[in-house]
Image (spheres, helix red, strand yellow):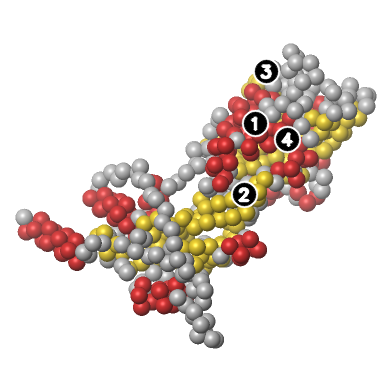
């Protein structure tokens, strides 16, 4: 009974001393709890993908018969042999799981017409593991005469995989194919190695390839990456570089980090960072000093789109994080369906530096500085900052040639079906929405009350 009364008095004292502010507490476990908080609430685009279960889909067409004589094809064989757990042949309309050693199966391919590539790539997209398709991209249907040269038959499958938050890599290898085989006129064709994976997966098949195959030795082979999520980032260490005036404790977690600033706002953060002065002249710097930065973004991470603009979205998580900590301490289940609304006029990104070098440096919005809606916690403030894609430029026209080849069924014309598949995928409203709202990186900040 004494314990309950004591707890009530302590809680009452905290509430009254905070006046109109939100009472906040993390039990002294900020760095531990913030990791769980993030994974419980904000991890997106990571549908389970099974590790170590690569499936191969092989188009039994002339392109892979001729592949036996390709140096690039042969350079990739060890990767397929080492990683493949399932091997599917595409023989006309039949997609069959074959038994036997992958090496021997790849060496015994014979041509079968009318490969059902549409069904094969859909099967790949609907799986929960990595897969690879070896094909010339020609989707023939016996019932359609001279059709499909601009049919985007792969588009839906590409969308399905990207909407799960994963990655697609395509190696495009030019070669010449006689038709009719083996003594007909030569056509300029492409051999495609289409990889469905996720770069965040340990020992993924794409990483295996780039670690074991010297791609620089194959100058005629082109590579294209498709993604609508997790653009490539780099930093000097495991986190951004925090302004030394903040004396911050920082911990990186890969796609996000946590910072704890021990100095107070009115006597430390605001005069030293928000309203910092030029040490040489004493004049107030227009944007103050950067409080953290050095995060470099590969602006071409999405393949068909180039990231042109980014923005910082700021959220007050005082109540949400405190509730999470309280539930953890009480051993209770925490509700994860929280909704946060971004707050303006607090943090901004140096746009010039991003556009020039792809580097993200964060400043306080000194000109429009409105801290009260963000910093209403007592005795701590917990703030979430999402760095998000704001704008992209459509760049696919520069890469479309990688996926175009001579049409065999319509001589003199170009088969653009693979290129159109990617183009239509990128034009899909859901894919565009994923890209244009994609969180690049998240920073959590714990500061004293203001």
Q: Which residue is mark 3?
A: 94
172 lies left or right of 361: right
Please report whichever mark, 4 or 2, sits nearer to the chain's N-terminal start. Answer: 2
Which residue occupies the extreme front position in the image?
A: 368
Say few, some or many: other residues with alpha carbon within 10 Å of mark 4 (under 14 / 14 to 19 / 20 or more).
many
Depth order, front residue of 3/247: 247
Residues under labels 1 and 2: Cα distance? Answer: 20 Å
SS of the residue under disc 4: helix
Residue 286, compared with residue 103, is above or below; it is below
Q: Which residue is mark 2?
A: 392
SS of the residue under disc 3: strand
Residues under labels 3 and 2: Cα distance? Answer: 40 Å
**Mark 3 or 2, closer to the camera:** 2
Q: Residue 213 got which mark?
A: none
Return the x and y of residue 339 as percentages of the image width and height.
37, 46
Res 130 seen here:
no
Please report whichever mark, 4 or 3, sits nearer to the chain's N-terminal start. Answer: 3
Please report whichever mark, 3 or 1, sits nearer to the chain's N-terminal start. Answer: 3
Q: Which residue is mark 1?
A: 155
Return the x and y of residue 73 as percentages of the image width and height.
77, 38
The residue at 74%/13% (across/down) is 143
């Amino acid at each position: 009974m004494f314990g309950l009364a004591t707890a009530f008095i302590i809680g009452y004292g905290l509430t009254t001393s905070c006046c109109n502010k939100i009472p906040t507490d993390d039990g002294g476990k900020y760095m531990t709890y913030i990791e769980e908080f993030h994974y419980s609430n904000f991890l997106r685009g990571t549908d389970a993908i099974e590790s170590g279960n690569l499936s191969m889909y092989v188009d039994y067409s002339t392109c892979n018969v001729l592949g036996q004589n390709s140096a690039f094809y042969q350079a990739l064989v060890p990767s397929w042999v080492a990683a493949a757990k399932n091997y599917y042949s595409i023989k006309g309309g039949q997609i069959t799981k074959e038994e036997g050693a992958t090496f021997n199966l790849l060496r015994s391919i014979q041509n079968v017409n009318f490969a059902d590539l549409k069904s094969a790539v859909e099967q790949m997209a609907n799986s929960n593991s990595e897969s690879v398709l070896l094909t010339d991209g020609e989707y023939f249907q016996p019932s359609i005469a001279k059709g499909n040269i601009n049919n985007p038959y792969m588009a839906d499958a590409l969308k399905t995989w990207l909407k799960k938050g994963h990655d697609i890599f395509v190696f495009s290898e030019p070669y010449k194919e006689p038709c009719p085989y083996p003594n007909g006129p030569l056509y300029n064709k492409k051999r495609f190695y289409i990889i469905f994976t996720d770069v965040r997966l340990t020992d993924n098949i794409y990483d295996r390839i780039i670690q074991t195959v010297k791609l620089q030795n194959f100058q005629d082979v082109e590579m294209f990456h498709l993604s609508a999520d997790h653009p490539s980032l780099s930093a000097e260490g495991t986190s951004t570089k925090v302004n030394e005036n903040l004396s911050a404790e920082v911990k990186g977690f890969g796609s996000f980090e946590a910072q704890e600033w021990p100095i107070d706002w009115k006597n430390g953060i605001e005069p030293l960072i928000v309203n910092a002065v030029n040490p040489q002249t004493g004049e107030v710097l227009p944007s103050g000093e950067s409080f953290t930065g050095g995060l470099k973004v590969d602006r071409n991470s999405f393949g068909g789109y180039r990231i042109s603009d980014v923005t910082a979205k700021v959220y007050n998580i005082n109540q949400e994080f405190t509730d999470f900590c309280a539930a953890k301490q009480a051993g209770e289940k925490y509700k994860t369906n929280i909704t946060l609304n971004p707050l303006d006029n607090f943090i901004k990104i140096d746009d010039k530096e991003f556009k020039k070098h792809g580097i993200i440096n964060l400043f306080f919005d000194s000109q429009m500085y409105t801290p009260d809606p963000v910093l209403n916690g007592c005795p701590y403030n917990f703030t979430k900052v999402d760095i998000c894609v704001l704008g992209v430029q459509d760049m696919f026209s520069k890469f479309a040639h990688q996926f175009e080849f001579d049409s065999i069924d319509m001589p003199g014309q170009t088969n653009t079906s693979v290129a159109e598949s990617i183009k239509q995928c990128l034009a899909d409203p859901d894919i565009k929405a994923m890209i244009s709202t994609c969180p690049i990186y998240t920073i959590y900040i714990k500061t004293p009350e203001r």
